Image (cartoon, rainbow, N blue to C red):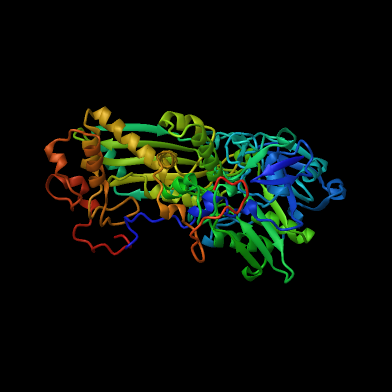
């Protein structure tokens, strides 16, 4: 199987019915998708397949042969957060962090499709994602802030180390960052 | 105090939103084996036959452990506080809850480990389970626990007892007795990160243990006790917890992976499935609380009798500690001068119960508040004014005779009334938590306040 993962073409040796979650985590070492329930119930394993959120724990790799897979590692990195990442960071839309990659990816896909979602549309889109810490209020606030573009420069550059770079450079080819 | 009230960025937020935070499951050590457990399919049974030889010989299996491999199999979570131990790490002669671990396999991968678990030969002699705490003290109920129906180590007693004032006198003087039974049920803590641990044997003979525990030093002590090792041979790496809510106070995976790592001389990871998390991990306890209150027609609480049954599940873990906290709070945020309380830690054939967000206290707070509403309803009084009247005030003595120096009941009730637009009479709206005097110091409370006693010394009066 050949996949484009975060902009890089990768060949997988996993058997066809191996889950995309295990292939990403164990073969490619991409650990942001989490094995929360492995039953499609919690949303912690969410990745984008050709731009759409998918449960990687229920997706056999053969079903995504040739597709483009995006994980949260490709959206942005410390010092160069994507607007959605920065909004979750700035609005405290996270606590323990285990569900966060799934929420960030689902939100990214939502805003791609619908740049100004209503509150109901946000709740509808994120209903398959479980968060046990926040009570969801601040997650919804983060999505609304991202949609309105209310994200500070400080948050976009949070986590930067070393000399600051004037020109953001795209380190992962194909990354939306 | 610069941080108080300030909007500070989360120190771990950037790692979380970029997927860089490394949880235990994300640690990659080459050569790591997978662990899988044989768990009891029965809530209560004797083990009549156990043979792991076929599993040991299965290709890809590196180690199988049973209770015989544990240097010290029985260790109690409260042993450091002088409470004797009752729970085996791996079952010996019997199993006492569905999901109790009996043997654990370490193999090259998850599928091989599961195959090996299926090859373990085991036979049970099923026994009648006790699943309802209310039946534990029935004359024909046979306790399965070596200590009997209930935890017997509250000093010389089998219950946490509080005796304060003259409770029988209060019930004789009362205009009305108001009774209530309250039964909050078990709750799974349900962190999104399931129980997971990774133990790595190091060339210097030590073990590095990656742990999702909420209680690093406590877990370290538990592992060291089971292994009969000094603490300085253990290196714990933790502090990154994918949600805990109390469910990661018990030491779930660390000791087992440590034993498997030592036996196989390979790194070993054990990650529970969501099903194991629900069926086998500790939950918040179900409780059974019975309250009878002696009250006057004008709304004074003269006395309370209370019996609590705390469902410990099959073993003690932190239950006696939870019931002790529960007993201290059994009057709620109110001052009741005459008390008789008995709290029992009852054993049932359910998965052991343990910590969850203020355990011991949340159950009794729920019961005490609903009971206040019930009293108000019976007496035809305003439920908030009933609370303000009986509220804790400076100088009051709690159930366990702590002298209160700054109780918050009055300001909290007033603030709540304000926020919901509740119409309180002026007499109540002006109340404070200042020491009792006048109408707020009726005769029945004279013995229960320490107006002239020592000022708050932190030790009670």
How many tags in the picture?
0
Q: Residue at x 73, y 46 (%)?
A: A10
- Using residue A128 as the reference point, say whether residue B410 is left or right of it: left
Q: Position of residue B252 (x, y in %)?
A: 62, 51
Q: Quadrant of the C terminus of chain B?
A: bottom left
Look at the picture and state if B60 lies above or below A19.
below
* Residue A54 percent location from the top left of the image: 62, 35
Q: Residue B436 at x, y = what percent?
A: 17, 50
The residue lying at 61 percent from left, 63 percent from top is B236
The x, y position of residue B353, in whole percent, is: 55, 44
Of the pair B10 and B289, the residue shown nearer to us: B10
Most foreground residue, A112 or A167? A167
Q: Nearer the viewer, residue B366 or B315?
A: B366
Q: Is residue A58 visible in the rendered structure shown here?
A: yes
Is any part of residue A130 visible from this angle? no
Q: Quadrant of residue B259?
A: bottom right
Instruction: Report the side of A32 relative to B365 (left or right).
Output: right
Which quadrant of the figure contains the N terminus of chain B? bottom left
Left/right of residue B224 with respect to residue B331 in the rendered view: right
Of B62 and B177, nearer the camera is B62
């Amino acid at each position: 199987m050949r996949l484009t993962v975060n902009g890089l073409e990768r060949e997988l040796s996993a058997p066809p019915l191996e889950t995309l979650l295990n292939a990403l985590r164990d073969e490619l070492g991409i650990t942001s998708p989490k094995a929360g329930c492995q039953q499609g119930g919690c949303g912690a394993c969410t990745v984008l397949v050709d731009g759409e959120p998918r449960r990687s724990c229920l997706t056999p790799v053969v079903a995504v042969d040739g597709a483009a897979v995006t994980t949260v590692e490709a959206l942005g990195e410390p010092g160069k957060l994507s607007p959605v990442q920065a909004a979750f960071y700035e609005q405290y839309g996270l606590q323990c962090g285990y569900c966060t990659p799934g929420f960030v990816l689902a939100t990214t896909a939502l805003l791609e499709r619908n740049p100004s979602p209503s509150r109901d549309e946000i709740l509808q889109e994120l209903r398959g994602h479980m968060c046990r810490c926040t009570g969801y209020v601040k997650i919804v606030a983060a999505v609304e802030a991202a949609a309105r573009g209310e994200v500070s420069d400080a948050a976009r550059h949070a986590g930067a180390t070393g000399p600051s770079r004037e020109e953001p450079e795209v380190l992962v080819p194909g990354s939306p960052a | 105090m610069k941080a108080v009230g300030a909007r500070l960025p989360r120190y771990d937020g950037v790692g979380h939103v970029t997927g860089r935070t490394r949880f235990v499951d994300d640690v990659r050590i080459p050569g790591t084996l997978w662990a899988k457990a044989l768990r009891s399919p029965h809530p209560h049974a004797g083990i009549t036959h156990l043979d792991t030889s076929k599993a040991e010989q299965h290709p890809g299996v590196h180690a199988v452990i049973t209770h015989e491999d544990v240097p010290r199999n029985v260790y109690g979570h409260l042993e450091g506080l002088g409470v004797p131990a009752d729970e085996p790490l791996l079952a010996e002669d019997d199993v006492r809850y569905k999901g109790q671990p009996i043997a654990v396999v370490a193999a090259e991968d998850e599928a091989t480990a599961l195959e090996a678990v299926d090859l373990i030969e085991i036979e049970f002699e099923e026994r009648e389970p006790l699943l309802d705490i209310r039946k534990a003290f029935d004359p024909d109920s046979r306790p399965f626990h070596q200590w009997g129906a209930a935890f017997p180590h509250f000093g010389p007693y089998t219950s946490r007892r509080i005796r304060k004032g003259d409770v029988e006198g209060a019930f004789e003087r009362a205009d009305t007795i108001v009774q209530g039974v309250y039964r909050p049920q078990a709750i799974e803590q349900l962190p999104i990160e399931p129980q997971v641990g990774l133990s790595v044997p190091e060339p210097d003979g030590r073990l590095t243990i990656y742990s999702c525990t909420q209680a690093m030093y406590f877990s370290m002590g538990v592992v060291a006790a089971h292994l009969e090792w000094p603490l300085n041979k253990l290196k714990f790496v933790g502090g990154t917890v994918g949600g805990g809510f109390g469910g990661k106070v018990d030491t779930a995976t660390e000791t087992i992976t440590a034993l498997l790592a030592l036996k196989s001389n390979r790194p070993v990871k054990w990650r529970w499935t969501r099903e194991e998390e629900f069926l086998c991990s500790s939950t918040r306890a179900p409780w059974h609380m019975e309250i009878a209150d002696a009250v006057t027609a004008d709304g004074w609480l003269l006395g309370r009798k209370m019996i609590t049954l705390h469902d410990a599940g099959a073993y003690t873990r932190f239950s006696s500690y939870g019931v002790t906290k529960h007993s201290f709070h059994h009057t709620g945020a109110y001052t009741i001068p005459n008390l008789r309380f008995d709290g029992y830690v009852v054993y049932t054939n359910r998965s052991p119960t343990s910590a969850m967000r203020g355990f011991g206290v949340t159950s009794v707070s729920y019961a005490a508040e609903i009971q206040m509403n019930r009293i108000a309803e019976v007496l035809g009084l305003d439920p908030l004014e009933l609370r303000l009247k009986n509220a804790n005030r400076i100088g009051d003595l709690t159930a366990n005779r702590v002298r209160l120096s700054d109780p918050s009941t009055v300001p909290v009730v007033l603030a709540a009334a304000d926020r919901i637009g509740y119409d309180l009479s002026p007499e109540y709206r002006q109340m404070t938590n200042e020491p009792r005097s006048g109408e707020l110091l009726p005769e029945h409370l004279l013995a229960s306040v320490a107006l002239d006693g020592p000022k708050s010394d932190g030790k009670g009066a």
